[in-house]
Amino acid sequence: MDAWGLFWIFLTVFLFPFGYKPIIILLSIASIFSAGKVFSIGSSDVPIFFFVEIMVILRLILPNKNHKFLTFKDSTSFVYLLFIISLWLYTYLVANLFGDLRVFSSINTMEDNYRTGGVFLNWSSANINQLMLLTAHLLLALICYKRKDVISKIFYFKTIVLTSLIFIFISFIWKFQPDLYSIIGFYIFNNLGYAINALHEARLSGTFLEPSAAGLYISTLCIPFLVHENKNIKLLGLVFIYLSFLNLSSTLFFSLIVSFLIIWFSTKLKLDYKVLWVMLLIILISLLFFLFGDEFFSYIDSKSLSQSGEVRAEVNANSIVNIYKSYFFGIGLGSERTSSMFLTLFNNLGFLFGPLLIYIVYRLLSPIQNDKVGYTLRMMLLISFFGSFVSMPELTNPIMWNLIFANIFYRSSAIVDESKKGAN
C-alpha cells in the first residue's frame, strides 16, 4: 500500500458517514483512475473504483435520514442475486467443461499468449477477478435501483462534469508540464506497475492505462457536452475536442462515429439538426483528411502491420474459434482476453448469458421521457457501450458502469428536502 492507496482509503472512510451524495461523488471521480490501485492482496491488485464501489454498496444499504435499512426480499432482488450466483457456477462449469480449448489468458499479456500460442482453458484467478468485479457492479446497480429516488440525475450529471474537469486538468499538465506529469504519474495515480507504460506514450492517456481507454472516455463526453443546452457544458465539449487531437486513438475515432450515429437516429433532434450534424461531420472529416491524411493513413498502416496488429488479429481469430468450439455457450467470464468487448461478451458468456446480462441491466434503467439530463446520460452510456466494441475488452469498464448507475436513478429534478418530506 502506498500514499495514493492510503489517500483513497482515508477519503472514502471520511465521507462514509455523511450520507449518500458525498460517496457517490467519490465513485464518479474514481471511475477515471483506472491506472491506480488501493492495495494488493497477494499478486492481485484492488482497483480504486472497485474499492470505492464496495463502500458505496455498504453506504446505500445502511439507513440515512428517512430511508430505512435496505432489504432484498422483493422479486427483483431475487432474480438479480440468482443471476449473479448462476454466473459464478456457469463460469466454473464451462471453464472446466471446455478444458481442451486453448485460450489467450487474461493472466498473461497478449504478446506472451501470442508467442506461446495460448494456454489450455482452466478455472483460474482471472475468472475470479472478473467475476468479483462484475458482481460488485451488478450488486451496486441493483442497490441503485432500490434507492433510485434518493439521488437525482442532475446531481449525478454534475458529478460527471466535476470528474471531467479533473481529467482536463491532468491532461493539461501532461501537455504543458510533461515533467510534472511524469512525477505525478510515477509517484501517484499510476501505481499499478504496468500502468507506468502510459507515462511514455506520445498520445494522451491522462488518468487511464492507455490512449485507447482515454479515447473512449473523451469521445463519450465530447458530443453530448457539445449538444448540451448549457453554455458552460458546451465549452467543456470544445475542450474535449482539443483533447481528441491530443489522443488520436482508433478507439476515439470509432466512438466519435458512434456518437454521430446516435445523434442521427435520436428522436430528440429535429431533421434540420440531423442534417447540420451530418454536414459538420463531412466538413470535419474533410478537414482532417487534408490536414492529417498522410499521418493518419501511415498510423493505421503501421498499426495493422506492427506486432501489436498481428497479436490483436490472432487474439480475435482465436476467440471466434472458441465461440464455435464451445457450441456458443462461452468459456466463462475472464477465461480469455480478447481485444473487443463485443467479442468478450460472446466469447466469455456465450449466446445465453451475454444477451441476458444486457437485458437485466437494461431492465434497471429508468425511462427518459422528456428528461433532457436523462437523455444526455443515456447518450453517454450508449457511446461508452458501443464505443467499447472496437478495442476495449473488459465487460467491467468503470466508465460504462458509472454511467449505468447514473441512468438507473429516476429523478431528474432536485430532491425534496428530507425533513420536509418527513413532515408531510
Image (cartoon, grey):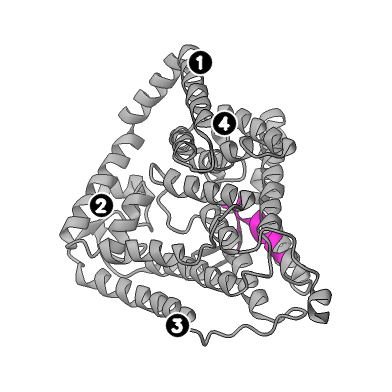
**Residue 56 on image: x %, y %:** 64, 70
Point out the image quarter for the N terminus: bottom right
Real-space CA distance between mark 3 and mark 4, rounded to the nearest whole angstrom: 43 Å
At x 34% / y 24%, what residue is drawn? 301
Residue 244: which disc?
4
Tag in front: 4 or 1: 1
Q: Quadrant of residue 23 in the image?
A: bottom right
Is disc 2 in contact with disc 1, using a CB cutoff of under 8 Å?
no
Three-letter code, disc 2: Ser
Q: What distance separates the C-alpha of mark 2 from that of mark 1?
A: 37 Å
**Residues at marks 3 and 2 touching, judged by CB atoms closer than 8 Å:** no
Dot label at residue 45: none
Compare residues 228 and 248 and report the one nearer the observer: 228
Q: Distance between the residues labelled 1 and 3?
A: 54 Å
Q: Which of marks 3 and 4 is in front?
A: 3
Q: At numbered mark 3, what does the secondary structure look like: helix, strand or loop?
A: helix
Foreground: 167 or 274? Answer: 274
- In the structure shown, which secondary structural element does the residue marked by tag 4 occupy? helix
384 versus 309 height, above or below: below
Which residue is disc 3 drawn over?
78
| The quadrant where residue 387 appears | top left
Q: Identity of the amino acid at label 1?
A: Leu
Which label is found at residue 319?
2
Residue assigned mark 1: 287
Q: Is residue 327 left or right of residue 288?
A: left
